Amino acid sequence: MKFSVYENLPYPIFIADSSGRLRYVNGAWRESLKVGCGELWTTPFDDLRETDIRHAWKRCCEAEEPLTNSARVGSGSENHWYHIYCQVIGRDDAGEDASETMVLGSLQDITEQTLATAETHAILDTAVDAIAVIDQNGIINSFNQAAVEMFGYLTEEIIGQPVTILMPEPYRSRHEMFVSRYLATNDKKIIGIGREMEAIDKAGKQFPIYLAVSEIRLQGQRRFTGTIRNLTEQYAARQTLAEQRARIAHVDRLSSMGEMTASIAHEINQPLTAISLYAQAGIKLIERGNAERGNTELDKLHSALEKLSTQSLRAGAVIERIQRFARAQELQREVMDVNQLVIDLIKLAESDARLHDIELVLDLGEALPNRLVDPIQIQQIALNLIRNAIDAMNEIHCVNGRRIVIRTTLEPRDLVAVSVSDQGPGVAEEQADLIFTPFYTTKKDGMGMGLAICRSIIAEHGGTLDFYNNNDVGSTFVFKLPEVSTHE
């Protein structure tokens, strides 16, 4: 075969037999690669993977399939990249073996394109956002450093993988349909628009992202570039802002409730005062009457009117405290015996307990130090806890028992504790973080303000209000008051 026709061509040409032995190389080959004839496998192609090229070479010789590959040639400090094209051209009719298959190969210098691609990758690796390039079949061709850090895959792990590996359901199942529809119709749903969605990393963790997709063409082939931004921090900021707005809304509602409460309290005070006056007038009429003192019915009426007067005055005092609390005025505090406050409170709670056939049990600590408190507010808190306990036990029809224990104790750091223990269902785990939140309630007709207000009042006293579930049944709510000197 005469090969002189290839000698002066400007690009490297070689002819080799089926074993890979170079039979001919032209001048451009010798000048570019600095080697002459010999084994193709011993030429300075640094990036040729021998196993792959040998298998491809065998298919080229036996099945006459074209062979294409890319390789790097190292020459000192210089590197060149070539694209290799090979094709069977016939038999060697001039050699010893006339049946020998001969292959014509040419090299195309792609150094500039390769360096430009490398520069592009270097630029992409400096980008803050994750960037991935996929082909029209959805295979990942490029993955920058930010994407590596975001998804946890090494570059060599992810290149060649379907992009759906980065998508959780339902995005994974829909992706192929979206791409196929776009290629067929050019109807843009995401491309050039962008959207928020979910992604999944190598560890299987899902996280929110913003995905912007653009289309490019490289060497006549469609490619899609996806710019990905992790929205985890933004979502957290949104959640925090939403919670802040909710808290502000709660404060606004509490403020409105305070104004409304003050107005209602003012209106209620008038009939309460009238009730007390009428009760006292009734008592005086009975005392001045000519009826015999031994008359049992009159005695009962006299006792009832006295109680009516006492409780109406007490209700008035409670309303006055509510007005003061709603208007954020200074509270009236006194140094009080906490045990005596609890004993007086039981008189108010007993009627409600008897109505539900529930026993109130006192367990009072000895020699407890006095505390500087607003007695009406402290009693109202304890009364609220007792009524909550009664409601909780009635909710399960008192199947665990019918006893509520009100206990006072001296705790470490000189704290006086008042606790109310019930035999109800206890506090569910999902309610534990919400039970003191304003407007959260488990009661059908509740407003969700009782415990929130109670905790605020105790906090104003420098104390704490909390709860725990008992070891056997029910729960215990306990508030603790600090030493007197703290607030004198």
Image: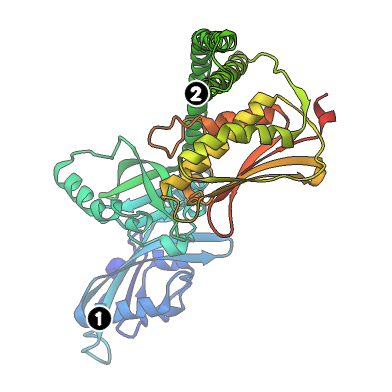
Which of the two discs, 1 and 2, sits closer to the camera? 2
Q: How is the image coloured?
A: rainbow
Work out whether residue 303 or residue 387 is closer to the camera in this orientation and state it: 303
Q: Could you tell whether 138 is left or right of 143 in the image? A: left
Q: Residue at x 50, y 36 (%)?
A: 352
Work out whether residue 15 or residue 153 is closer to the camera in this orientation and state it: 153
What is the number of the mark on residue 164?
none
Percent x, y of residue 455: 61, 33
Q: Which quadrant holds the N terminus?
A: bottom left
Crowdedness near tag 2: few (<14), some (14–19) or many (≥20) residues, C-alpha within 10 Å: few
In the rendered image, is residue 456 in sight?
no
> Which quarter of the figure has residue 99?
bottom left
To which residue does mark 2 refer? Answer: 297
User: Image height check: is 26 above or below 165?
Assistant: below
What is the number of the mark on residue 61?
1
Q: Could you tell whether 89 is left or right of 376 in the image? A: left
Mark 1 to mark 2: distance in Å?
A: 126 Å
Q: Could you tell whether 428 is left or right of 15 in the image? A: right
> Which quarter of the figure has residue 225?
top left
User: Image height check: is 77 above or below 427?
Assistant: below
Question: Is label 1 in a helix, a strand or a loop?
Answer: helix
- Which residue type carries mark 2? Glu
The answer to whether mark 1 and mark 2 are in CB contact below 8 A is: no
Question: Is label 2 in a helix, a strand or a loop?
Answer: helix
In the rendered image, is residue 8 in sight?
yes
Q: Could you tell whether 52 is left or right of 262 in the image? A: left
- Which residue type carries mark 1? Cys
Q: Earlier in the sequence, mark 1 or mark 2?
A: 1
